[in-house]
Image: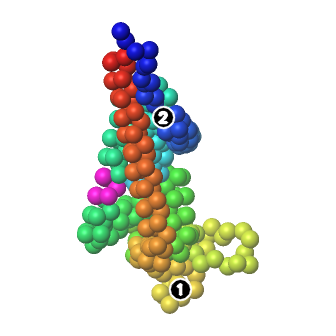
Amino acid sequence: MMSGKHFKAHEVSCCIKYFIFGFNIIFWLLGVAFLGIGLWAWSEKGVLSNISSITDLGGFDPVWLFLVVGGVMFILGFAGCIGALRENSFLLKFFSVFLGIIFFLELTAGVLAFVFKDWIKDQLNFFINNNIRAYRDDIDLQNLIDFTQEYWECCGAFGADDWNLNIYFNCTDSNPSREKCGVPFSCCTKDPAEDVINTQCGYDIRAKAVSEQRTFIYIKGCVPQFEKWLQDNLTVVAGIFIGIALLQIFGICLAQNLVSDIEVVRESCLFT
């Protein structure tokens, strides 16, 4: 005769389940927002109506950053949300593995950046110079370069003469541009008394002596200024990266914990 007693089956932790769902719904919505911004920017530039124009730029299109980041956030957020809500082990495992791969890549990139500092510096120089060439080809790229030069108070990769790489700013005799031997306005030193930006402040400035240029434009390049900024804000930068890493590890642990709960519940159901 069987006893009237029965064992209560294990239950999936609701706290973990809904915490993962809530966290990932925010993540997913941010991904949608980034994708929306990227696609809107592309439509404004006519890329969506002419896909071949993607390859026309000689420099980096900042819209790619929104699309890639948004795509990754969308995929991870979707997998985490549906996996937690539907108690889907496959999606939760996909979420944790994908997040683990990203964490590993970030860790690898950090180690390589420390070991190959000089190579990274050369690549940054190449990247900036390549974008200087394409400065006038894309409004988003132009705004990104202007923001960088204004924020770090720099001009060019290693100096103002790097703008010779651009067809509008170079000092060659054959250059018919009014901006010949000049620099973009974002290289100009700012006068706090001026409310309106003088977009012509960099005209003909590189035709003057270097000692005179110092009065009107930033002389230091963006690469050394970026290095200085990193050194000055090393604690903040390190704290941000550590915080992101801990958040990723926390997400992986929660997802794996939920997967374990789901598998225990399924096993208990088979034997009841």
- Colour scheme in use: rainbow
Element class at badge 1? helix
From this view, report whether residue 67 is shown above or below residue 7: below
Q: Which residue lies at the image location 36% right of the left edge and 29% below the top edge? A: 264
* Residue stretch rendered in magenta on the structure: 104-108
User: Within the magenta stretch, is there residue 184?
Assistant: no
Q: Is residue 118 visible?
A: yes
From this view, report whether residue 195 is shown above or below residue 64: below
In terms of secondary structure, what is the magenta stretch mainly?
Answer: helix
Q: Mark 2 points at which residue?
A: 13
Q: Tag 2: residue type?
A: Ser
Q: Tag 1: residue type?
A: Arg
From this view, report whether residue 98 is shown above or below residue 120: above
121 or 187: which is nearer to us?
121
Q: How far is disc 1 from disc 2 in space, using C-alphas?
A: 64 Å
Element class at badge 2? loop
Q: Is residue 41 left or right of residue 67?
A: right
Give the label, 1 or 2, closer to the camera.
Answer: 2
5 or 12: which is nearer to us?
5
CB atoms of marks 1 and 2 within 8 Å: no
Q: Mark 1 points at which residue?
A: 214
Q: Is residue 265 left or right of residue 32?
A: left
Q: Which residue lies at the image location 25% right of the left edge and 69% below the top edge? A: 115
Name the disc covering residue 140, or none. Answer: none
Q: Which residue lies at the image location 47% right of the left edge and 66% below the top edge? A: 239
Q: Which residue lies at the image location 48% right of the left edge and 78% below the top edge? A: 232
